[in-house]
Image (tube, grey):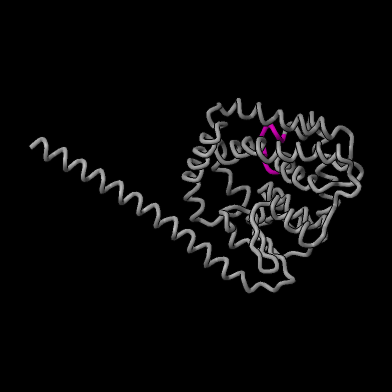
């Protein structure tokens, strides 16, 4: 009798494993099928049009995504006409923003910029020295790969209930916010930074803003008197601290001790976003 019980338990365990594997594979195939169907819809886009697929407009600034704000600022800097799509937000890699251009679907803000530079023969760094470019790149990577976690901690973990005040989101998405917050926390744990306390995370990422401020000093832009390509990314990240994280220590720093960062953002906004107010969600 005991032997039969062991065999039955082992059989159930194997069956469960098989069902889990098949279910996981089926879900992956279904997600890919959905992505393929979505991309097919955009395959007929006129070749001379660039479609920027991105998240909805937000209330304190045009985009609550530093990567979307970065890319849209770049398109304005490079004088590339574009149209916005805020329905198909997630691209072929499950990331935002992404673009459709000349039959290609490209995801990841940095890869998109490199793709367009090559495709259109664009170079906005002609008047920038190697040293300036090196400093700008270091600040960009730090903001995108490290400071981002402080932004995520504040916006999606500690203040997840305030997200609907940042942008208008569908009712179903509101219901899923707690689940999304849990998933993000798991991602932070997998990354390693989620093992720290919120206070420690804020201390580490506040140091990023101090570094960017020190690198900028009294210069107008990271490219000197004119912005370079990486200014778009730096602006996209720092603008979140200036306008997109109300009540945070990041906001207090940018409006106080590190006011050169706010002044920098104001200059970028004036240069590339004359329609800033019109691009914000007024609902």
Q: Is residue 193 left or right of residue 139?
A: left
Residue at 74% x, 32% y is 209
Q: Quadrant of residue 123?
A: bottom right
Could you say where residue 196 lies in the image, as x and y percent from the top left? 55, 27
Q: Which residues are magenta?
A: 244-251
Q: Is residue 98 left or right of residue 26?
A: right
Question: In this rendering, is residue 185 above or below 104?
Answer: above
Could you say where residue 171 lies in the image, as x and y percent from the top left? 51, 56
Q: Is residue 239 left or right of residue 200?
A: right
Residue at 65% x, 35% y is 146
Could you say where residue 145 lies in the image, as x and y percent from the top left? 66, 38
Position of the C terminus by quadrant: bottom right
Near-viewer residue (254 or 120) = 120
Q: Quadrant of residue 197?
A: top right
Q: Residue furthest left?
A: 1
Q: Is residue 274 visible?
A: no
Near-viewer residue (110 or 147) = 110
245 in the magenta segment: yes
Could you say where residue 155 lies in the image, as x and y percent from the top left? 60, 40
Q: Is residue 271 visible?
A: yes
Q: Looking at the image, how many numbered discs can be counted on the residues? A: 0
Residue at 80% x, 57% y is 76
Residue at 62% x, 71% y is 43
132 in the magenta segment: no
């Amino acid at each position: 009798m005991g032997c039969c019980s062991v065999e039955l338990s082992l059989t159930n365990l194997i069956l469960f494993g098989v069902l889990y594997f098949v279910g996981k594979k089926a879900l992956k195939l279904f997600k890919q099928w959905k992505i393929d169907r979505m991309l097919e819809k955009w395959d007929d886009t006129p070749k001379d049009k660039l479609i920027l697929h991105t998240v909805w407009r937000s209330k304190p600034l045009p985009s609550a995504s530093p990567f979307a704000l970065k890319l849209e600022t770049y398109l304005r800097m490079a004088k590339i006409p574009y149209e916005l799509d805020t329905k198909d937000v997630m691209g072929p890699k499950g990331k935002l923003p992404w673009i459709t251009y000349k039959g290609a679907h490209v995801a990841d803000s940095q890869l998109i910029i490199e793709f367009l530079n090559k495709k259109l023969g664009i170079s906005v760094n002609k008047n920038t020295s190697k040293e300036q470019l090196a400093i700008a790149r270091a600040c960009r990577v730090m903001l995108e790969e490290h400071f981002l976690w402080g932004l995520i901690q504040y916006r999606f973990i500690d203040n997840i209930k305030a997200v609907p005040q940042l942008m208008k989101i569908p009712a179903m998405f509101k219901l899923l916010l707690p689940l999304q917050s849990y998933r993000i926390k798991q991602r932070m744990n997998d990354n390693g930074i989620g093992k720290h306390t919120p206070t420690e995370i804020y201390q580490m990422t506040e140091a990023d803003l101090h570094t960017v401020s020190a690198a900028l000093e009294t210069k107008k832009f990271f490219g000197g008197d004119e912005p370079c390509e990486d200014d778009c990314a730096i602006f996209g990240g720092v603008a979140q601290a200036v306008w997109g994280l109300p009540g945070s220590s990041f906001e207090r720093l940018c409006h106080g001790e590190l006011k050169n960062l706010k002044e920098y953002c104001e200059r970028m906004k004036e240069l590339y976003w004359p329609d800033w107010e019109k691009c914000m969600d007024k609902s």
